[in-house]
Image: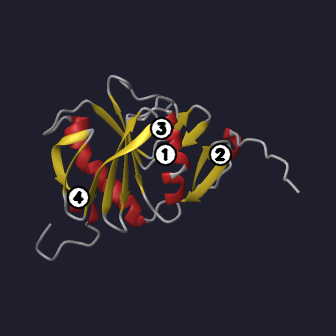
Amino acid sequence: MTRPARPAATYEDLLAVPEHLVGEILFGELVTHPRPVPRHARVAMRLGSVLTPPFDLGVGGPGGWFFLAEPELHLGEHVAVPDLAAWRRERLPTIPETAWIDVAPDWVCEVLSPSTEGYDRGEKRTVYAEAEVGHLWFVDPRSRVLEVFELRGRKWLLLNVFREAAQVAATPFAEPSFALNLLWSFDAPPAGQA
């Protein structure tokens, strides 16, 4: 016996998601998952704090980018919420006044967790390719790995895998490079060191 097809999720369905959950619409289905745990959120914040000065503010780097944490992206029929996203300023010269952005980012980063990894590597990666996001990074705090992908045609090409304390020089943020272990600093520094 086949089940009747469910109607596609709507934005009203998304607005009804409880605040303690993140809601997305991927291929017509409402997807919810818990808000990131502190370790996950800290990795995303640390990566943003490493990339923002040189690439967004132009301090010690080329500038020319605009970064956001957890933006609501309207990509055609899909509503996705990546951990981090960035746009080249020539493509997004001003901050929209809406609660969402309908211009596909040039770069997206997903911090992988057990509750989201399947969607991040599956449906969301497909959505980002369809929207022609040029660059995708996956950061896995559990294995301390950064995977760097670039869109070629409509397919993701894995360019680099960085581990533990590797020096990261990766497209589209190759210069200046940074030490990957900056993302893994979860404990307080020893007494006397700040």
Cα separation between marks 2 and 3: 23 Å
Please give the name of the residue rendered at 26% of the width and 62% of the height, measured from the top-left corner.
163
Residue neighbourhood size for the residue with mark 2, other residues' Cα within 10 Å, grouped as few (<14), some (14–19), many (≥20) = some
Front-lying residue, 101 or 130: 130
Judged from this view, the residue extending furthest toward the right is 1
**Local SS, label 2:** helix
Query: Residue 111 in the image: x percent, y percent?
Result: 40, 56
Cα separation between marks 1 and 3: 6 Å
The reply to whether residue 20 is visible in this rendering is: no
Cα separation between marks 4 and 1: 23 Å
Q: Earlier in the sequence, mark 2 or mark 1?
A: 2
Tell me, for residue 129, which label it has, or none: 3
Q: Picture quarter containing residue 191?
A: bottom left
Tags 4 and 2 touching, CB below 8 Å? no
Tell which tag, 4 or 2, sits nearer the viewer. Answer: 4
Query: Residue 54 in the image: x percent, y percent?
Result: 19, 40
Q: Earlier in the sequence, mark 2 or mark 3?
A: 2
Cα separation between marks 2 and 1: 20 Å
Tags 1 and 3 touching, CB below 8 Å? yes
Tell me, for residue 125, which label it has, or none: 1
- The C terminus sits in image quarter: bottom left
Residue on which the image places disc 2: 14
**Amino acid type shown at disc 3:** Ala
Query: Residue 161 in the image: x percent, y percent?
Result: 29, 55
Tags 4 and 3 touching, CB below 8 Å? no
**Amino acid type shown at disc 1:** Arg
**Local SS, label 1:** helix
